[in-house]
Amino acid sequence: MIPKSKKPTGSCNPDEHVLSRRLFLRGLAAGSVALGGFGQLFSAANAQEATRRQKHVILVYMSGGPSQFETWDPKIGQRTSGPHMTIQTAVPGVRFDEYMPNFARLANRMSVIRSMTTPSNDHGVGSLHTQSGYFPSPAISAPPHWLSVCSRLLPRESTDGLPTYVMLGRPDFTPGPGFLGAEYQGLVFPGNGMPPADLPRASEGDIQAQDRREGLRSRLGAAFNEGRPAHLVETHDVSFRRMSNLMRTQSAFDISREPRRDHDRYGPSPLAKDMLLARRFVEQGVSFVRVQHQNGLAWDKHRNAFRSQRYITAEFDQAVGALVDDLVDRGLWEHTLVVCMGEFGRTPMINGQGGGGRDHWPRNWSMSLGGCGIRGGVVVGATNQDGTEIQNRPVSIHDLFCTFYRALGINHRRQLYHRDRPIPLVENQQGQPIQELF
Amino acid sequence: MHRFLLFVVLGIAVPTSVFAQAKSFGDPKISAALDAEILAVLKENKQKPVGPASDAEFHRRATLDLLGRIPTAEETQRYLADKNPDKQRQLIHRLLADWEMAAYWADVLHVGMNGRSADPGLGYKEFREYLRQSLEANKPWDKLARELLLPVTNSPTQPAAFFLGSRLRRENKEDQLDGMTVAVASTFFGVRMECAKCHDHPHVDEWKQDHYYGLASFLSRTELQLVNAKPSLRERDTGDVTFQNRKRDSFTAKVMFLDDKVFPEPKPASKKIANKKDLPDLAENSRRKLLADYALVADNRYFKRALVNRVWKQLMGVGLVEPVDQIHDGNTPTHPKLFDLLADDFAKNGFDLKRLVGNIMLTETYRRSSVWPEKERPKESHYAVFNLRPLTPEQLALSLATATGYVEILKAQKKKTEPKDLRAEMEKDYKLFIENYESENDQFAATTSQALFMTFNKTTQKYLQPVAGNLSARLVKTSDTEALARQAYLAILSRTPTSAESEAIAKYLQTSGAARDPLVRDVLWALLNSTEFRFNH
């Protein structure tokens, strides 16, 4: 078997060893036993254990910039209204887009911010800014993704070999670990529920063969590493150990093991597969999952927007709705922060000839979050009647980040250090947690 | 006045470099002076440097730095067997004159100017070939820089239009001008002025908005045209740059260089050109030419230092000034005298890139071991010990192909037409390596995805399959395990194995219950994925 890392035993919780062995055995057993009641039983057990363990985040990133008018802040009978209708939600007086029946039903669980305001209308800048909390500038060292920060501050105590942070779907325009270094880079999965690129389906024999040659690799490398900078040589070696772990935990990310009816509930979209995978990860204890809603800029609807808007809104609603239901059912909701957002919103006016659409609009936009102690059913801020301006309570990206960290029990005024320089979690220590959400 | 000066400089530049190439690259006196400066700073910090690297290490290091690949087993054996006490200097001279050096440094320059992109866009191939030829001819840097700024359509310098032209392919006018301004400022003058775009630079007193827009004004009349789908640069004779400060007051930018030199606008051109297609390469009163004439000269303190800092970092792992293109008065170099010495020598000797590289590589500083025996490793910028550098994506791609024998096969196939550029033959592989290994902000990243790529990806694994003439095939046939270990170490780690290493391999090959061929491949895999292979050390 793989040589266990020589950590001081004081830092390990003996329970965790038992747990991880059980998880591992379960993986083997599930390979030879048909799906069904058995898998269900185990996932319930896993959910309990994971619940006991950790806080989680599932970030659904709606690249391209979702329209607030066609999601959480629709307007009725205004010059800025699009062709969609609106529906009543579970919260009296709050209406969402007609293609969001699940968000409407779950409006008491999730909350909405309708008064996000950010400076940039550029996809690249906006994506970096809204996922790092820092406005990108060549003058500062690359700020990390907030989930990399979480991986650093809320490390997962586990020996089961699963990663702490995974990214499902191609993370274009997405910050990496920045100055925190590769250790806090999310492991990239290609999307559509698929396993990481190049990872073969490994039999027990393959795993043993890999362990054997990894043993040779580290034996032969030991002499070289002596006297060389540890942060470089260790990072390299760790990446191979992680790969070995990944091979033996494949069942953790094999969504074909999920029952058919779950696949049906999440829907047929690639996003649905990734949401199912995200749930599976969180159940097994992976802390942070970033899900890219379709590779590319799916929500970026400038032209002919209303030919396709309803499909993307609906697939998003179905998949995220099913996820929230499952997190609640499995007792994970109190520990899992679910965040749905893009890099900005879209223009109030429908631009372009004929089959027009909405352009980029960072001045007021909407997003949704819930779980992990976030109060449900709240609508933070409001836009004016036709949605051209914020009417009250503008929320900055800094406020939002303070809110994320507070929900996760991280002091939002905390600083990290890079080359002996203090770097605050939130740019210039700006912003305040949104009190209404706690 | 400056026109006259330029003439003089160019006048000497060409013959000097030709002369230098024939004689030698680099001046031992300069190298000794650089070492003295490094030692002085070490002494100030009460530190002592480590001793020199082993022969094998130095050979691998120099080959990686100049050819972008590890040495072949034959090259290593030849070097190790060479008893000539002057063999280090001879090696550097041989490598600097090698055709592979031009191909590899074309990548180095390209990445420095344009960054890394798996798909750099239209005109890239021709641009890279243009750089390669320029390096092969050891074209002086001032001449090369001038061509990059003033390429001539339908001439051998047209491919240089990619440098500004790739920026002109961006979506909107503002990004185009910003892209050109930032690229010119960084590549030729070693300064980064993005911050001065929206307001006077907050941290650098030197940089005002006037400087950013002043430099932009030299470039703003540039237009991109495609001639047979190849970029070509044209220039309008009208158009000014306007900008706003934070208070939203508007200004028309002066045509002004970084040192505050302002150029008055000459009288407008005699004839109007109505059709964009008829624009000439350069307008009658060309602003781009004004910039080239004024700034790309030996006595320009920005121009002579910018490339020196980059080349130093390329070879030593850390710039004399960091970030590498933030050279300004408030950002003191770690070794100010050394920086001036090297920059002055570069400018005085016709901007001879190979001389510059030789000057650095012939120092004792460059030859130091990378092993620090004590606990606390000293700062990288002190050079008490050689800085470990991860192989770049380009170096990894070519080194993997070299180690496993793919390059040999490629060369054998091309025997009749001597290859000038191995990369061109393996562009697809390079792309994959760039996608997998390009890291943000220069930071070393080792990810699980990379481990997977090196272990299971079809492209990397094809190198480990035994194919007539490659390393894997040779090793599979070698029954003597000691000989096998020796061949594997020479080919992959560019040295001979220790007896302990040979024994470890022998023992591994005796693993019970496993076939020998996969075990041999395991040995290759283990060495190719070792830290020793991953870094230039």
Image (cartoon, coloured by chain):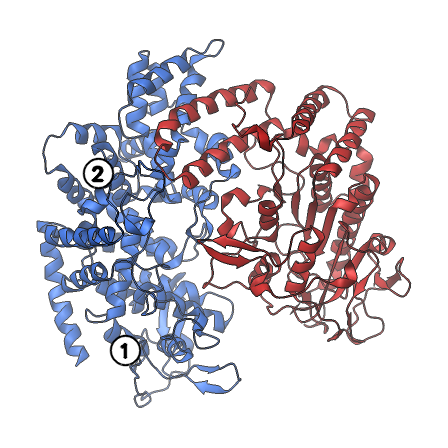
Chain colours: A red, B blue
Label 1 resides on the chain identified as B
**Which comes before the other along the chain, label 2 or label 1?**
2
Residue B242 image position (x, y, % from top left): 45, 83
Q: Residues within 10 Å of mark 2 (few under 14, many from 20)?
A: some
Report the amino acid beneath label 1. Answer: Leu
Residue B376 shows in the view: yes
Chain letter of the residue beneath label 2 in the structure image? B
User: Badge 2 is on which residue?
Assistant: B51
Q: Residue furthest right?
A: A92
* Callout 1: SS: helix
At x 49% / y 47%, what residue is drawn?
Answer: A181
At which x and y percent is residue A48?
78, 34
Depth check, front residue: A263 or A364: A364
Circle number at residue B313: none
Q: Is residue B426 above or below residue B517?
A: below
Q: Residues within 10 Å of mark 1 (few under 14, many from 20)?
A: some
| Residue named by callout 1 | B290
Q: Is residue A276 above or below residue A177?
A: above
Quadrant placement of the C terminus of chain B: top left
> In the current view of this chain or complex, which residue is farthest to the bottom?
B267
Local SS, label 2: loop
In the rendered image, the vertical position of residue B263 relative to residue B188, given as above or below: below
Report how far apart the C-alphas of labels 2 and 1 lie in the structure. Answer: 50 Å
Residue at (42% x, 13% y) in the render: B516
For this view, does B425 lie left or right of residue B362? Answer: right
Q: Tell me which amino acid carries mark 2.
A: Gly
**Can you see residue A170?**
no
| Frontmost residue, B402 versus B425 | B402
Say if B270 sits above or below A325 in the image: below
Name the residue located 36 percent from the left edge and 64 percent from the top edge.
B326
Mark 2 in CB contact with mark 1 (< 8 angstroms): no
